[in-house]
Amino acid sequence: MGLTSKSTGTNLLDDNNFIKNSDYEFIVGLAGNPNVGKSTVFNALTGMHQHTGNWPGKTVGNAIGEYKYKDKKFLLVDIPGTYSLMSNSEEEEIAKDYICSGNSNVTVVVVDATSLERNLNLVFQIMNITKNVIVCVNLLDEAKKKGIHINFELLSELLGVPVVGITARKTRTLSRLTQTIDNVCSGKIISNPKHIKYSDNDDSNEIVAKILKKSEEICKKVCTYDKQNYNERDRKIDKILTSKFLGIPIMIAFLGIIFWLTIEGANYPSKLLSSMFSSIQVQLYKFFNWINAPDFVTGIFVDGMYQTLAWVISVMLPPMAIFFPLFTFLEDLGYLPRIAFNLDNCFKKCCASGKQALSMCMGFGCNAAGVVGCRIINSTREKLIAILTNAFVPCNGRFPLLITISTIFVGGLGIGFGASILSTITVLLVILLGIFMTFFISKILSKTVLKGFPSSFTLELPPYRRPQIGKILVRSIFDRALFVLGRAISVAAPTGIVIWLLANIGIHDISLLEYIANFFDPFAKLMGFDGYILTAFILGIPANEIVLPILLMCYLKSNTLVDLEDTMQIGTILVQNGWTFLTAVNVMIFTLLHFPCATTLLTIKKETNSKKWTFLAFIIPTICGVVLCMCTTLAYNVVKLFL
């Protein structure tokens, strides 16, 4: 998506990352490490005057916004967050190229007041490229809580550039920053960066070593601490959460709690939405009857398209509205980097990147989002491994089927509260199987088509922070839940029409849907289920949420998708159609291990620009699911034979 100016409608960036629009007095580049509040600064300054898209020729997202100060218009360019300009990831290449272009009148480098020494690494690298630099020390409130005090005047003197302290969440503190930006741009303040002396023979490691040594010297002079062990609380917590023995069990427990809350909390709003859509459907029938629409037209648009959309929204939205805020809460708290730390060694043993843990976690919400998240991985080989294995963790669209089956065939063994606990444990075991398969297939890929050794990377464990509940809700629901739901709706609508046609067009009183199911039945029997189940999965490629309603439609010989709210009623239908505990186990396995949805496949094609890798992303999990289901069925039959 290109970037356009509100005033002219022209493209803002050319292929060299130069701003082509001239309606602004000054252009400001905003740089910084990840997790320093750079986005908060950007949002606070620009408000709603923002444009988002991709950098020319790249898949990395960008943001450009405008703000006014003393009747002057400033264009703020959000440069991708990076720890260094000396590596080769897309983010670092873009950041370096943009800063080197000299396109900005000033570059503001946002740093974390609680981790100043580490952040100065990027500051020195940027000062070595461009002269007009402002250091913006953010998170002063966090520093105050930890008893950290910074002498900004001395820091400015030692660096040779203006230094401004702010708390971006408190917008009133930004006035000092906007005033300093204006003074530097207009020439009232002259930056004179004090560079670190490098030798022509110094490699990147030697340069970084000199920067780190200088940063340490500066911080000893400008930083004072009420308590030298100011971060003792964080370190004590990390000793538990990143413990060799407790780290992974605690991570599993957190995931279990999130999934249990999602399972328990989604039931009531799902029923409410389902009832609402049913009422609307009655009115749609009346409307189509009033305009004398043919039954064929009513069937396509109401029984086909509308009913499919209604099911997807009522089943998909409530779990997402619970899961995404809970997941974002852990992200805002600072726990997600700890998950990556805990799993880093596992991925290294698979010759993959530890960053894959983060993209895998994103896949729980949406596999398409997880695929996009693989951009953070520097190595092309490791990025492809992460993309090809992202579908091994169940996305939000697969949870309803997993939850329903586990509730019927496992939860039914418990009573009351115990039933939901058993269901949660079952879903958690399926997820752990997905994580194991991610490691297993990553190892196979790294030894075959994607041979290589794991690369090293810097993983920051940011300080624990109090989550901002309001921003969590906005970001998780609007930026994630509704965005994913919109993409699901776009593919579910035409699918509803196709499904209705297959169910209503037949030969010799047998629908095309039944012909397809009968064709797949012999193969499906080898996997421990029937042709209707396999047909439902295939027709559910556009959206995993519609697999269950397609299956119920087939079993009930209905001409439309069946929306049943009573889980036990669904269980009765399944049992009457030959389902056993083995069937339930195999369906849960195949729900976990089968081809990604259409949205994810299209995302993979866009990210890799390759039909080959898209096909492999489709076929690898499918083969794993088929083989595992066949093995489970064979083992069951062998045991049954001997017993």
Image: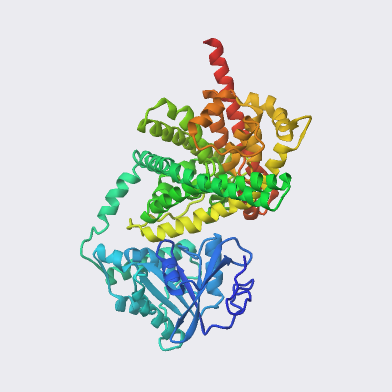
- Total residue callouts: 0
Classify residue 445 as left or right of residue 343: right
Q: Residue 206: x percent and y percent?
A: 45, 63
Q: Quadrant of the N terminus?
A: bottom right
Query: Is the residue 620 above or below the residue 20 in the image?
Result: above
Q: Return the residue nearer the eye: 179 or 68.
A: 68
In this picture, residue 166 sits left or right of residue 436: left
Give above or below for 182 relative to 5.
Answer: below
Residue 404: x percent and y percent? 50, 35
Q: How is the image coloured?
A: rainbow
Residue drawn at 34 percent across, 78 percent down = 156
Residue 68 versus residue 239 in the image, above or below? below
Q: Position of residue 330 (x, y in %)?
A: 39, 51
Q: Does residue 182 appear to the left or right of 572 in the view shown?
A: left
Residue 386 visible in rendering: no
Q: Is residue 24 left or right of residue 463?
A: right
Q: Residue at x 45, y 41 (%)?
A: 267
Q: In the image as oriented, which residue stretches furthest toward the right?
A: 508
Determine the residue located farthest toward the front in the rendered image.
290
* Quarter location, residue 548: top right
Q: Up-down: is 561 above or below 26?
A: above
Where residue 360 sits: x, y (%)?
Answer: 50, 46
Instruction: State the residue in front, 207 or 368.
Output: 368
